[in-house]
Image: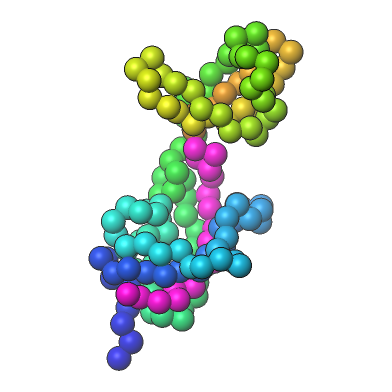
């Protein structure tokens, strides 16, 4: 009898993650499978839930809405910073990943969203926030 994946199982999964327009944002192709414990919050909830009940060797496509992935995009996590307040040695090209520090010293990852002559727009949302994600997944191994 074939075992189906259940919460608490260690799963080995090959995957390709795409945006709705087909752009691949991550894949395990050419690498070892992703290994994680099902149901423990180690991967996004929508994908974690979709793997429960799969059997070894089974493949499927999964669509994960923002609320079951990286959440909605929040405008209050986007900040305009005067360009002259950023040291010259720090890259400010759109798409650049940087780290800011909160007043209490906590590091926050941000992405340069836009750059003008006078301001830099920094976005502290996850880069995939607000996006519906599509995954092609294959359960390779349980255990």
Q: In this view, does 89 lie to the left or right of 43?
A: right
From what the image shows, is residue 35 above or below residue 5?
above
- Image quadrant assignment for residue 86: top right
Task: Pinpoint residue 41: horizontal percent, then vertical percent.
Answer: 32, 52
Q: Which residue is drawn at 45% across and 69% down?
A: 13
**Residue 137 visible within the image:** no
Q: Does the magenta stretch include residue 22?
A: no
Residue farthest along the bottom direction in this orientation: 1
Q: Residue at x 51, y 27 (%)?
A: 99
Q: What stretch is highlighted in magenta?
A: 126-143
Task: Pinpoint residue 47: horizontal percent, then vertical percent.
Answer: 42, 59
Task: Pinpoint residue 78: horizontal percent, then vertical percent.
Answer: 52, 23
From what the image shows, is residue 46 above or below residue 83?
below
Q: Is residue 131 magenta?
A: yes
* Protein image colouring: rainbow
From what the image shows, is residue 120 above or below residue 128?
above
- Screen quadrant of the N terminus: bottom left
- Screen quadrant of the C terminus: bottom left
Q: Is residue 122 left or right of residue 93?
A: left
- Image quadrant assignment for residue 56: bottom left
Q: Which residue is drawn at 42% across and 27% down?
A: 107
Residue farthest along the left direction in this orientation: 8
Residue farthest along the front direction in this orientation: 89
């Amino acid at each position: 009898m074939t075992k189906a994946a259940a919460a608490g199982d260690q799963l080995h999964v090959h995957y390709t993650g795409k945006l709705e327009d087909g752009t691949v944002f991550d894949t395990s192709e050419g690498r070892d499978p992703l290994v994680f414990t099902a149901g423990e919050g180690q991967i996004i909830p929508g994908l974690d839930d979709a793997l429960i009940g799969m059997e070894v060797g089974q493949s499927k496509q999964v669509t994960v809405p923002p609320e079951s992935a990286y959440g909605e995009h929040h405008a209050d996590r986007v900040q305009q910073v005067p360009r002259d307040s950023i040291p010259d040695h720090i890259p400010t090209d759109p798409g650049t990943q940087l780290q800011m520090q909160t007043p209490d010293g906590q590091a926050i990852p941000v992405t340069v969203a836009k750059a003008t002559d006078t301001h830099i727009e920094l976005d502290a949302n996850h880069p995939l926030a607000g996006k519906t994600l599509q995954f092609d997944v294959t359960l390779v191994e349980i255990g």
